[in-house]
Image (tube, rainbow, N blue to C red):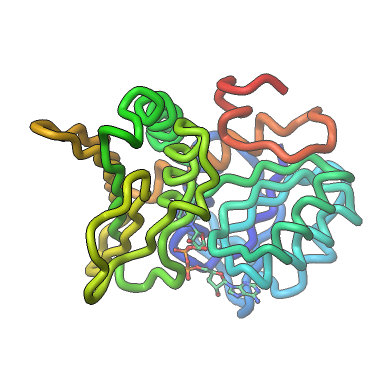
């Protein structure tokens, strides 16, 4: 597999290079907004700002950069027929449309979190939310990330909230509560609370709590290294090989959903 990594000089960009090299994959392009070179595991690879020369049929693109870049890279990957793995979070509705359009032409994996543990947590959360229902249990999601993180709440927290909503067969936007402040009154039954904490070097913590009368159930995931996301994204890139155009998630990659 030959990989092009977009956002190569970022925190995830470095972790992706390490994960790709240790999985024996070939990196054919490193892209970021500033030129330079990247030295991972003793191998120095130039970082370029224009991705067009490195996007070729047969190369797979992994993007962990910024939402505006992701929209442009989705269009470019489609026109060069490159499968695409998108890890960037904070993508708005217009960005999601661009990703949808690209997925009509090339296979795309788009996931808010590439850790295998979080994929399992998403699966479990939906099942637990079905049993610990809105009539008897209050669902609250709390996430914590490092102080550089730009978007809030995290894409993973939103994915977990959607999993609770799916388990309870409700539309998330009609029951979501993004943080609380002031005289908010009693908690409405069925509300799904979503809260973001920022500080220090936290790689990514997520807790889904179901508060009942006399008991509390907590589902918790803590990422201690970016390597877990990088390895999942490299695995997703390998999984894309030979797949038909379409929009896939880690649920497909891990076999929770049929292709
Ligand atoms: P970062 O800020 O360390 O890295 C982002 C990189 O993108 C930087 O090197 C920056 O220069 C580059 N970039 C920005 N604008 C660019 C442009 N116009 N052209 C080319 N490169 C550009 O951030 P990070 O912590 O590596 O995270 C990157 C993204 O990945 C964020 O959206 C983050 O939320 C997301 N993320 C996703 C997962 C997941 O599993 N899906 C895990 C961790 C982080």
Closest to the observer: 168 or 204? 168
Closest to the observer: 236 or 92? 92
Q: Residue at x 32, y 34 (%)?
A: 135
Give residue 249's position: percent from left, percent from top: 62, 37
Where on the picture, by quarter, is residue 136? Answer: top left
Side of 57 where 67 appears, left or right: left
Closest to the observer: 155 or 30? 155
Give residue 96's position: percent from left, percent from top: 70, 57
Question: Where is 130 relative to 229, above or below?
Answer: above
Quarter of the figure with the C terminus: top right
Q: How many marks?
A: 0
Give residue 42's position: percent from left, percent from top: 47, 54
Closest to the observer: 10 or 17? 10
Question: Where is 140 relative to 131, above or below?
Answer: below
Question: Where is 171 relative to 236, above or below?
Answer: below
Q: Residue at x 38, y 63 (%)?
A: 178
Side of 207 where 1 appears, left or right: right
Side of 252 where 97 appears, left or right: right
């Amino acid at each position: 597999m030959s990989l092009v990594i977009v956002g190569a000089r970022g925190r995830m960009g470095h972790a992706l290079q390490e994960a790709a090299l240790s999985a024996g994959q070939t990196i054919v392009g490193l892209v970021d907004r500033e030129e330079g070179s990247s030295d991972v595991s003793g191998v120095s690879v130039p970082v370029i700002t224009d991705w067009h020369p490195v996007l070729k049929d047969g190369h797979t693109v992994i993007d962990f950069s910024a939402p505006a870049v992701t929209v442009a890279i989705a269009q470019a990957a489609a026109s060069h027929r490159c499968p695409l793995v998108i890890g960037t979070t904070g993508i708005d509705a217009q960005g999601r449309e661009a990703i949808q359009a690209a997925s009509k032409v090339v296979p795309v994996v788009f996931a808010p979190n590439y850790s295998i543990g979080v994929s399992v947590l998403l699966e479990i959360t939906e099942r637990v939310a079905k049993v610990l229902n809105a009539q008897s249990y209050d669902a609250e999601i709390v996430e914590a990330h490092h102080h550089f993180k730009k978007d809030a709440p995290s894409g993973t927290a939103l994915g977990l909230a959607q999993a609770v909503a799916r388990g309870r067969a409700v539309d998330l936007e009609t029951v979501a509560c993004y943080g609380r402040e002031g005289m908010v009154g009693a908690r409405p039954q069925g509300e799904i609370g979503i809260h973001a904490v920022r500080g220090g070097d936290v790689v990514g913590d997520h807790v889904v709590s179901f508060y009942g009368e006399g008991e509390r159930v907590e589902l918790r995931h803590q990422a201690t290294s970016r390597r877990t996301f990088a390895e999942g994204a490299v695995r997703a890139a390998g999984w894309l090989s030979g797949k038909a155009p379409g929009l896939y998630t880690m649920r497909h990659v891990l076999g929770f959903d049929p292709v």
